[in-house]
Amino acid sequence: MLDLFVYLLCGSILVSGILAVRLDSTLAAAVSGGLASLFAAVCYVLLGAPDVAMTEASIGSGLSVVIFLYAIRRTTQRVP
Amino acid sequence: MADATLTAAAILIFLGVAFGVLRLVLGQTTVDRVAAIDMLTVVSISLIALYAHMAGRSIYLDVALVYGVLSFLAVLAIARYLERGL
């Protein structure tokens, strides 16, 4: 059953990565990238590395999405 | 009884991840995708907690705890972004 979950999560990482490349909306692409990081963190737990998963969950899935959104907001044209 | 409950929980979590990813792929608007992300976060936390029980290691519960504390920040930032506050 653990193998099945690892396969599902790896497929979800692939789907999220493809969506992050191919989506038109910049916000949706950043969110999909964060989701790939989330699934990677769960995959690390299932494969037996909880400390790596904790770092990945806090930095990869939490902080990077916030920094991406901040950068998108600062580099697009602001509507007056 | 306990094994049947754990198996049922695993099946429900499996279906939750599958349908969440399906909503992410099919979602027309960005808000659909953000809702899917929020649901997948909760499902992932429950998956980590279930695996901590099945593997018998309580150190994995710390990962679920840290993830539960930090996971709302991304959705909060997205909400602030959509309301043009960030």
Image: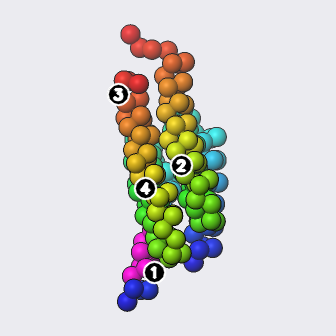
Mark 4 belongs to which subunit?
B
Q: Residue B41: x, y in percent?
A: 44, 53
For residue A7, above or below residue A64: below
Looking at the rendered image, the quarter that the N terminus of chain B falls into is bottom left
Amino acid identity at mark 2: Ala
Tell me the residue at 41%/75% (across/down). B9
The CA distance from mark 2 to mark 4 is 11 Å
Tell me, for residue B65, which label it has, or none.
4
Foreground of the two, B39 or A2: A2
Nearer to us: label 1 or label 3: 1
For residue A3, above or below residue B66: below
Tell me, for residue A57, which label it has, or none.
2
Picture mark count = 4
- In the rendered image, is residue B29 in sight? no
Is residue B75 inside the magenta stretch? no
For residue A34, above or below residue B46: above
Q: Residue A56: x, y in percent?
A: 58, 48
Amino acid identity at mark 4: Leu
Task: Check contact, mark 4 vs mark 3: CB within 8 A.
Answer: no
Tell me the residue at 62%/60% (across/down). A49
Tell me the residue at 43%/47% (across/down). B71
Q: Where is mark 1, residue-wise?
A: B7
The CA distance from mark 1 to mark 2 is 26 Å
The CA distance from mark 3 to mark 2 is 25 Å
Amino acid identity at mark 3: Glu
Q: Mark 1: few, some, or many residues within 10 Å (few <14, many ≥20)?
A: few
In the structure shown, which secondary structural element does the residue marked by tag 3 occupy? Answer: loop
Looking at the rendered image, the quarter that the C terminus of chain B falls into is top left
Pointer 1 or 3: first along the chain: 1
Nearer to us: label 1 or label 4: 4
- Asked whether the residues under marks 1 and 2 belong to the same chain, the reply is no
